[in-house]
């Protein structure tokens, strides 16, 4: 069950970290590549390419600029590595937005790091009003993104399961501060192989 919507105006952008598996010419990895894959917890070459491409995307893409014109940057947030024994060891969410964070340094946009186990604290931050009338970008592992937007107040029936094959979608949760929330998905269309479609609600995660 989803929580009540955030009680103040705020726009929350959510992305999955960039690619982690070795991708060849924009194609999905083969079964053999998957079976031999050892997780190094860092981005693949294509992932680093997407991280760089996201700078221009978030600073110059028209649909993003329209959001920022109404609610300017408040903060960038990324999933951080848990302590020893934790259950989130990936550096990828942080690596995905580091080029953007650097580009935003002249604007003094805060950069926050939260671990998977501290997700409730992130929800509390967004609900606190600190970033009222601002836009906050979150880079996270895909498994928790549906639960995160539900915890912010997006209705369950609006939130799809995140397709594990997709690294190329931006979720937008737009809260009006009066109990209303608009949730939509923006295909990024940044790299070869990126899809034009969105993830369908009610469709099983692939």
Image (cartoon, rainbow, N blue to C red):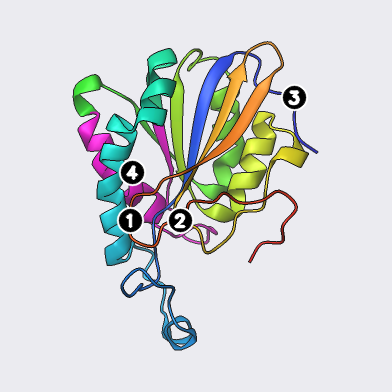
Residue contact between numbered discs 2 and 1, judged by CB atoms under 8 Å: no
Between disc 2 and disc 1, the foreground one is 1
- Spatial CA distance of label 4 from label 2 is 13 Å
Question: What is the quadrant of residue 76 in the picture?
Answer: top left
Mark 1 in CB contact with mark 3 (< 8 angstroms): no
Give the residue drawn at x 69%, y 37%: 150
Real-space Cα separation, disc 2 to disc 1, in angstroms:
10 Å
CB under 8 Å between callouts 1 and 4?
no
- Residue 157 image position (x, y, % from top left): 77, 40
Residue underneath mark 4: 97
Q: What count of labels does the image hold?
A: 4
Left or right position of 117 against 70:
right
Give me the residue at 43% from left, 77% from top: 29
> Which numbered disc, 3 or 2, marks the residue that appears first in the sequence?
3
Q: Secondary structure at mark 2?
A: loop
- How many neighbours does mark 2 have within 10 angstroms: few (below 14), some (14-19), or many (20 or more)? many
Q: Quadrant of the C terminus?
A: bottom right
Is 119 rendered above or below residue 180? Answer: below
* Mark positioned earlier in the residue sequence (4 or 2): 4
Of 129 and 155, the residue lying toward us: 155
Q: Residue at x 55, y 59 (%)?
A: 87
Q: Which residue is mark 1?
A: 191
Tags 3 and 2 in contact by the CB under 8 Å rule? no
Q: Is residue 11 above or below residue 26?
A: above
Circle 4 sits in a helix, a strand or a loop, which is it?
helix
Residue tagged 2:
167
Q: Is residue 83 magenta?
A: yes
Sequence-first disc among 1 and 4: 4
Please provide the residue range marked out in magenta: 76-104
Residue denoted by label 3: 4
Does the CB distance between marks 4 and 2 fall below 8 Å?
Answer: no
Q: Which mark is residue 65?
A: none
């Amino acid at each position: 069950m989803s929580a009540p919507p955030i009680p103040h105006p705020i726009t929350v952008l959510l992305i999955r970290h960039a690619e982690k598996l070795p991708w060849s010419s924009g194609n999905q990895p083969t079964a053999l590549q998957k079976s031999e894959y050892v997780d190094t917890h860092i981005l693949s070459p294509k992932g680093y390419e997407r991280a760089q491409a996201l700078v221009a995307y978030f600073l110059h893409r028209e649909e993003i600029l329209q959001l920022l014109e109404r609610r300017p940057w408040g903060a960038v947030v990324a999933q951080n590595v848990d302590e020893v024994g934790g259950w989130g060891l990936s550096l990828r969410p942080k690596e995905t937005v580091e080029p953007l964070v650097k580009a935003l340094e002249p604007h003094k946009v805060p950069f926050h790091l939260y671990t998977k186990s501290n997700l409730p604290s992130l929800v509390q931050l967004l609900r606190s009003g600190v970033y009222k009338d601002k836009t906050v970008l979150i880079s996270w592992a895909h498994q928790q993104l549906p639960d995160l937007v539900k915890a912010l107040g997006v209705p369950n029936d609006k939130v799809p399961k995140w397709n594990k094959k997709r690294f190329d979608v931006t979720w937008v949760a737009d809260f009006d501060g009066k109990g209303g929330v608009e949730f939509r998905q923006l295909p990024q269309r940044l790299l070869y192989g990126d899809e034009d479609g969105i993830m369908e609600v009610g469709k099983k995660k692939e």
